[in-house]
Image: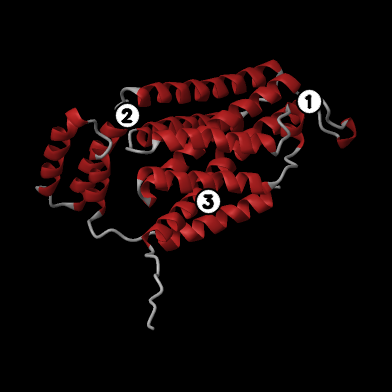
Amino acid sequence: MLMPILFAFLIGVAVALIRRRTPSADAPARLLAWSVGLLPAERRDWGRAMTGELDRLDGRVERWRFALGCAAAAVVMPPWGRAAAALCVLTAIAVGGAGLAVYTHVHYRLHTDGWTWVSAAVLLLVLTGYVLGGSVLLRRPGVAGPGLTGGALVAVAWLAISGFTFHRSLTGLRGHLSLVLLAAIVVGLVGTRWGGGAAAGRRAARLAGVTAGLGVFLYGVLAVAILGATGHDPSDGWTPAQVVDDNLGNQAVLYLIALPLVTATVGWAAAAATARVRRTPAVIPVDRD
């Protein structure tokens, strides 16, 4: 099942890279402009002041240091209103997934060594990155609605190919891959039309990937915590603890890496295609008689 998913991911990356254009401004200026776009209306004066300050800096290192500092300040600044409520939900899901992973590790007395701590640190960084990424995307105009709704659609599609059961979600995905691809395409298409451009569609696809990834990861870890090693074949030589450990790792790889990447890249390609079709003028036949 993972091979066709990875193939779809590579196709999406190829289309996205072909459609991407190189901006003319220098990299620190682009980064700062992106950061200013995250600020609420009452902080836009600060953003303009930072843009003017960057223009006075000449050294490449100094410009990068200044732009990165401004970007970090903008990213960690929490959103307001409905976006803040959505971010709280995403944070709660991420914390719940991490907590369930720790509970499962302790409850089933899994082996702990140096690699365990490395894996835990990587998982924590990924979950934190998803929350910060969700915070950034939720503040973009025209992205929250299609992104969150699309995330629910993508999550349902991935749960559908597991039969909506804990057991099948751990023993392999046997449904149709077309459901996963169709959901990502719909997110890119609707996000582009809703937001009025390909940029909004791409952001909606990324937000959908973040939302669905966190949600289905929580579902998968819950399945591992409840089922443990139930249903595995003792003749394979694996101990119950090894089976649980393997299942726990699979949830992170499949739902925090494969799911968001497929959603973002296929949705990106769909957004680019939708924007291109919208820009193509209709050809009206002319009667020459």
Left or right of residue 232, residue 18 in this image: left
Q: Earlier in the sequence, mark 1 or mark 2?
A: 2
Closer mark to the observer between disc 3 and disc 2: 3
Q: Is residue 61 above or below residue 16?
A: above
Estimate how packed mark 3 is, as few (under 14), some (14 to 19) or many (20 or more) residues with alpha carbons within 10 Å: many
Q: Position of residue 199 (x, y in %)?
A: 36, 49
Question: Can residue 122 be seen in the rendering of this structure?
Answer: no
Q: Position of residue 27 (x, y in %)?
A: 26, 53
Q: Residue 76, labelled with which disc?
A: 2
User: Circle 3 sits in a helix, a strand or a loop, which is it?
Assistant: helix
Q: Earlier in the sequence, mark 3 or mark 2?
A: 2
Q: Nearer the viewer, residue 239 or 228?
A: 228
Q: How far apart are labels 1 and 3 at the CA level? A: 34 Å
Q: Earlier in the sequence, mark 1 or mark 3?
A: 1
Residue at the extreme bottom? 289
Badge 1 amino acid: Ala
User: Circle 1 sits in a helix, a strand or a loop, which is it?
Assistant: loop
Closer mark to the observer between disc 1 and disc 3: 3
Question: Can residue 235 be seen in the rendering of this structure?
Answer: yes
Q: Nearer the viewer, residue 59 or 248?
A: 248
Residue at 46 percent of width and 58 percent of height? 273
Q: Mark 3 = which residue?
A: 266
Badge 2 amino acid: Val
Badge 3 amino acid: Val
Q: Is residue 152 above or below residue 103?
A: below
User: Circle 2 sits in a helix, a strand or a loop, which is it?
Assistant: helix
Q: Is residue 235 above or below residue 194?
A: above
Q: Mark 1 = which residue?
A: 229
Left or right of residue 275, residue 127 in this image: right
Q: How far apart are labels 3 and 2 at the CA level? A: 28 Å
Q: Position of residue 287 (x, y in %)?
A: 39, 78
Estimate how packed mark 2 is, as few (under 14), some (14 to 19) or many (20 or more) residues with alpha carbons within 10 Å: few
